[in-house]
Amino acid sequence: MTPLASLLAERIKAEGPISLHDFMQEALFHPEFGYYVAEPPFGAKGDFVTAPEISQMFGELIGLWTVDCWAKLGAPSLINLIELGPGNGTLMQDALRSAKLAPEFIQALNIHMVEASDQLQSVQREKLKDHEISWHKNFPDNVQGPCLIIGNEFLDALPIRQFVYSNPLLERHVALDENGFCFEDLPIGRNSDADPTSFGSLEEGDIFEICPGALDTVRNIARMLTKNSGAALFLDYGSQSGKAGDSFQAVRHHKFSKPLENPGQSDLTAHVDFKRLVQAADQAGCKILPIESQGRFLERLGIEARVLQLSKNASEIQKEQITSAHRRLVSSEEMGTLFKAMSFYCGMMAPPAGFGD
Ligand SMILES: C[S@@+](CC[C@H](N)C(=O)[O-])C[C@H]1O[C@@H](n2cnc3c(N)ncnc32)[C@H](O)[C@@H]1O
């Protein structure tokens, strides 16, 4: 049993089953034993590898995306660049390097990193020590002026609630039995905001999910953009169908594992529900773009040209690494289709790059 499993088991014995949402929140961010609070989870030695860690090209292209947005905002003399969940800080490091092509953009930059984990904040501070950056534990609501907001694999890390369609409606909880943690579905309270009607026709026993944190994040950002102007870009895995289903999953040492086993020592995530997030941004008054696959998004931003450029002076081994990273990022068999790009914006002369025909 992990130390966190013992604590959660004690809590369940004392208080009864806890919601899946609270289990996920504790597993990821318990102040002592949470997954993001303890050991660094990224890279070949960790549990998973994210796009910025696969290749510098990812962050570089996003850097150019931000420069393009800034130009479409009329090249203001101050622009806030806010990254949510920056992990090791690699995306920002690569983005700032490519953005140097536009010195006026670099001069206008006010950079903010939103990172809940102290441990990851110190990794980011070390990696980005040559840049002036403000760190925040929560989204900075009081930022003045136009904003560019980016987040890679941030939304999938926010806790979800799961409901089971039946009469009465049930919410999925985590309980204890003789074998350890197990799911228990309990009738929902009267004030729950679960709405099965938006998931189409459901059958008894179907599971549907909502991610309150992702919806709140997108709503807050969209409201801020309507006031301050700017654009948001999120890349993550998920679907745009808006359909019901169980996407709660755990990854440990690069393999799927059982989500209730090893809380605090495996990465718990859920697929991002892009359909509802885009609707939330739309309702908050932002212009929205059709969701794009990560592969197509990166191709539109010019990843092939960057592959050629990087390969020019590369050794044979480096060329193979560049080709392999390119394939991982864009191929449908790898991250290219499951991962998607979502953007919404306000007050720009033209839509952000990378979307549409
Ligand atoms: C899956 S990692 C992605 C890291 C990085 N963006 C990358 O692509 O490598 C999720 C990141 O979001 C952070 N995070 C998760 N929930 C958060 C929250 N509620 N507030 C701030 N940061 C959060 C984690 O600590 C971590 O840095």
Image (tube, grey):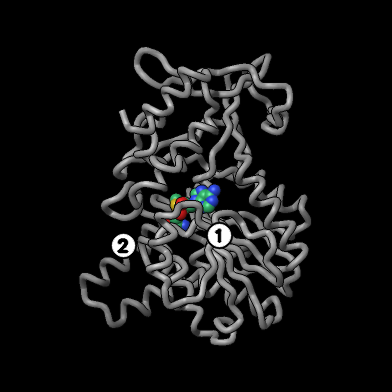
Q: Which residue is labeled 1 in the image?
A: 136
Q: Quadrant of residue 108?
A: bottom right
One can see residue 236 in this view? no
Asked if 344 appears above or below 193 in the picture, the reply is below
Q: Is residue 178 left or right of residue 133?
A: left
Question: Label 1 CB, ligand 1: below 8 Å?
Answer: no
Asked if 143 appears above or below 188 in the picture, the reply is below
- Measuring from the top left, give residue 229's x and y in whole percent: 73, 68
CA separation in Å, label 1 and label 2: 35 Å
How crowded pointer 2 is (Cα within 10 Å; few <14, some 14-19, many 20+) is rated as few
Residue at 61% in and 44% down: 213
Q: Which amino acid type is marked by label 2? A: Ser
Can you tell which mark lies on residue 324? 2
Residue at 39% in and 51% down: 334
Q: Is residue 254 left or right of residue 232?
A: left
Question: Label 2 CB, ligand 1: below 8 Å?
Answer: no
Residue at 44% in and 54% down: 118
Residue at 62% in and 67% down: 148
Q: Which amino acid type is marked by label 1? A: His
